[in-house]
Amino acid sequence: MMFRTHIAVGFLIGLFLLQILNPVNQILFIFLMLLGAALPDIDHPESKIGSKIKVVGFLFEHRGFFHSLFAVLLLYLLLLHYIDSASVGVYIFAITAGYLSHVVTDSITKEGIMPFHPISKFRVSGFIKTGRITEYVFLVIILAVSLWKLFSVY
């Protein structure tokens, strides 16, 4: 998926999570969701984040470890370990949920992901071609639902 699609999906999921988790700082929560949604592509040297830290793209296969469930779990555990405060748990969850949204969204593309990389090369893939009409239709649907959610009274 393209960067904009990952951001849109992260934003939509963040809107639903705001209602459930009710964080004190909703803007920070959404920002961290979006950061998490962009983070897995650090392994692609031409991505928004990967282009700033090119060495990661040379050391890791794109849609390899950073697009695995192990990376999601490792990120969550590292954040819990290094950020020692119960009051920020909801924000740690935001980054992790954004990251997971990226991984799940890439799993429905034709390229897919390897959810258990590096232990297994098993690949989960779907029907959406990155950067093609199917992704744009998906993006428009995500944006429409986001607008509905953003402006609906709950």
Image: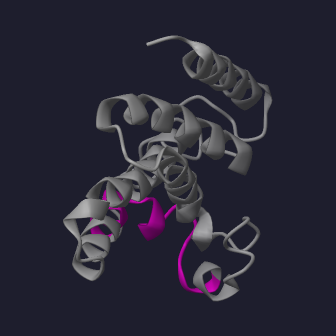
- As drawn, 91 above or below 71: above
Q: Nearer the viewer, residue 5 or 29?
A: 29
Q: Which residues are magenta?
A: 58-74
Q: Image point 50% across, 50% down: which residue?
A: 33
- Image quadrant in which you'd find residue 72: bottom left
**One can see residue 153 in this view:** yes
Q: Nearer the viewer, residue 117 or 4?
A: 4
Mostly what secondary structure, the magenta segment?
helix
Across and down, in percent, residue 103 comes to 46, 50
Quarter holding the N terminus?
Answer: top right
Across and down, in percent, residue 73 comes to 27, 63
- As drawn, 108 above or below 118: above
Q: Image point 72% across, 65% down: which residue?
A: 47
**One can see residue 119 in this view:** no
- Image quadrant in which you'd find residue 118: bottom left
* Residue 126 located left or right of residue 92: right
Quarter holding the C terminus?
Answer: top left
Across and down, in percent, residue 48 comes to 73, 65
Query: Is 55 in the magenta?
Result: no
- As drawn, 67 above or below 110: below
